[in-house]
Each structure stands twice: as C-alpha cells, then as structure tokens.
Image (spheres, grey):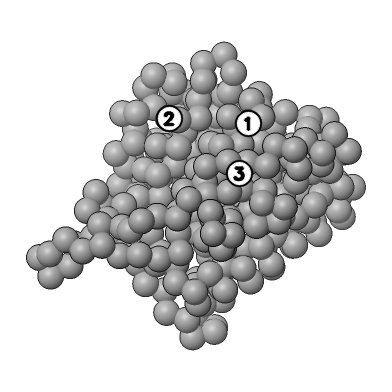
C-alpha cells in the first residue's frame, strides 16, 4: 500500500506522476493540493486572498465563504479532475473525491485563530478546521474494487459545512487508517533541505525520533509538514519519502532513494 501526497505547486509534474503510478502494482491512495491554482483562480475572479498568522508564527489562508468557493473550483474541481483524467489516460481506474463526498474526511471547525494585530491578541474565525475521522468503509469499498481514490480539500465539519483543512493532516489520518508501507510526499524541492536556500543540501535519512528537531523550518509550510510527519511515522509500520515532484519520473526517483527517507 502506498499513500501519495502530491503538492499543490505550479511546477509539480502531474503527467510524470501518472506515468509512474501506471507501473505500480501496489494499492494506492492519493491526496493532492492545489494552492498555486487556487491563488491564480482567486486573482482571475477578483477574490482577495487574506493571510492569518497565528501567535505561534504559522501562516494560513483566511478561509471565508468566497475562498471556500474558490477552493471548490480549484481543488475538488479543476485540479482533482485533471489528475483523475491523467490517471485514466494511463489505465488507472481513478475516482476523485473531496472530503465532502461520502463524508470521506470529517473535521471539527476551529474555534478561532489567535493572531497579533496592532499590538493586541485577537481571535479570528473562519471556515477552517482539523480533520478527525476518515470514512474507512467508503475507502475500503473503493480499494477492494480496484479504484484508486484521489482525495482533496475541502472536508466536512460537524455541522455538515465545507471547511478548509491542511492536507498534511489528512495524510496523517489516512496513514493511521491504512498503515501504508510508504507515504510519498512530492514537493517543489529535492527533499528536506539542511539549508532551505541550497537545493544540494538534501538530508538523505532521518530517524523517526529525529523528526521533531526538524520542525522549526524557515518555511511555515515545511514546518507544518514536519509536524504532521512527526505524528505519522510509527517505527516498523510507516516510512515516509519526501521527494521532488518536478522531475521526469517523480515516484520512480523517490523510490530509488532520491530525496529524504524518514524510516
């Protein structure tokens, strides 16, 4: 079993990923992002993207109703269906789902994000939250019938409302539910970098008990990813590959050892 997370950057090689998946005999579940497409679509639609930075220094997009609409178009619409299309072109029986569909991923809405503005600590509320449960029955039904699920945001909250959530947290939930042999994280970098501005400084291997010390990264997105990986890795059960999603054969290269192995 492979759990593959495809990053949402503009330079991720989706055709190359689809070609690689065609040659795999494992059962596969895919989770993908679409942040570059979301931002492009928001600009074209005249929707302002506002950022919230928590008191702990983590930045996130303010998910108001307009931004959720853009996410539905970008994530579960265009990006999801283009990935499904590419997989079918390579003979992979893919099915695209957001966390809403069949309540595939349920979450709880954030009570608020503590931010600093004008020297004051304020609580900002939006349509975002944490994933807490995966629909194992639906996931099992699809896998047992040779479908390849392609899952993305938004997820569904306790009020049955669409909310934004971090896909890395969704991947962590799925890893606990499926116990995959490998979780492959395809990003816009050659792997985890010792020096973020030096693409040659890839860290080849990290032991599970060393992950926590890599959480404090210059990139808030990488900080969030490492926090998720810290919760995901269970010695002897799940191994994680962080690899370059921009290469000609991203998954083949990752499984050949190009990138960072957490195991």
Local crowd size for mark 2, using a 10 Å CA cut-off: few (<14), some (14–19), many (≥20): many
Which residue carries the number 1 mark? 177
Earlier residue among tags 1 and 3: 3
- Camera-side residue of 116 and 80: 116
Would you say the residues marked 1 and 3 are in contact, meaning their CB atoms lie under 8 Å apart?
A: no
Does residue 102 appear left or right of residue 5 in this picture? right
- Is 39 placed above or below 231 here? below
Please give the label number shown on residue 5: 3
Front label number (2 vs 1): 1
Query: Which residue is at 39% across, 27% downward?
Result: 211
Image location of residue 121, percent across then percent down:
16, 61
Earlier residue among tags 3 and 2: 3
Query: Which residue is at 31% across, 57% downward?
Result: 113
- Is 183 placed above or below 210 here? below
Residue 62 appears in the picture as rendered: yes
Question: Could you tell me how far apart the alpha carbons at marks 1 and 3 are, in whole angstroms?
Answer: 15 Å
Please give the label number shown on residue 230: 2
Query: Which residue is at 60% across, 44% downward?
Result: 5
Task: Tell me the SS state at disc 3.
Answer: strand
Local crowd size for mark 3, using a 10 Å CA cut-off: few (<14), some (14–19), many (≥20): many
């Amino acid at each position: 079993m492979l759990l593959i997370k495809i990053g949402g950057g503009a330079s991720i090689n989706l055709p190359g990923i689809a070609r690689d998946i065609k040659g795999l005999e494992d059962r596969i579940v895919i989770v993908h992002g679409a942040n570059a497409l979301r931002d492009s679509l928001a600009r074209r639609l005249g929707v302002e993207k506002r950022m919230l930075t928590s008191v702990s220094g983590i930045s996130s997009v303010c998910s108001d109703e307009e931004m959720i609409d853009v996410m539905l178009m970008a994530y579960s619409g265009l990006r999801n269906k283009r990935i499904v299309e590419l997989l079918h072109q390579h003979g992979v029986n893919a099915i695209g789902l957001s966390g809403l569909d069949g309540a595939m991923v349920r979450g709880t809405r954030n009570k608020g994000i503590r931010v600093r503005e004008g020297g004051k600590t304020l609580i900002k509320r939006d349509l975002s939250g944490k994933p807490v449960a995966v629909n194992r029955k639906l996931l099992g039904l699809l896998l047992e019938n040779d479908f390849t699920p392609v899952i993305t945001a938004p997820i569904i909250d306790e009020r049955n409302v669409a909310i934004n959530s971090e896909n890395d947290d969704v991947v962590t939930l799925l890893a606990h539910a499926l116990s995959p042999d490998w979780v492959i994280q395809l990003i816009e970098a050659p792997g985890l970098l010792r020096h973020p501005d030096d693409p040659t400084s890839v860290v080849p291997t990290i032991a599970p008990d060393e992950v926590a010390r890599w959480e404090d990264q210059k990139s808030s997105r990488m900080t969030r990813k490492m926090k998720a990986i810290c919760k995901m890795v269970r010695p002897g059960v799940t191994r994680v590959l962080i690899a370059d999603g921009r290469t000609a054969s991203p998954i083949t290269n990752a499984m050949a050892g190009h990138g960072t192995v957490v195991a």
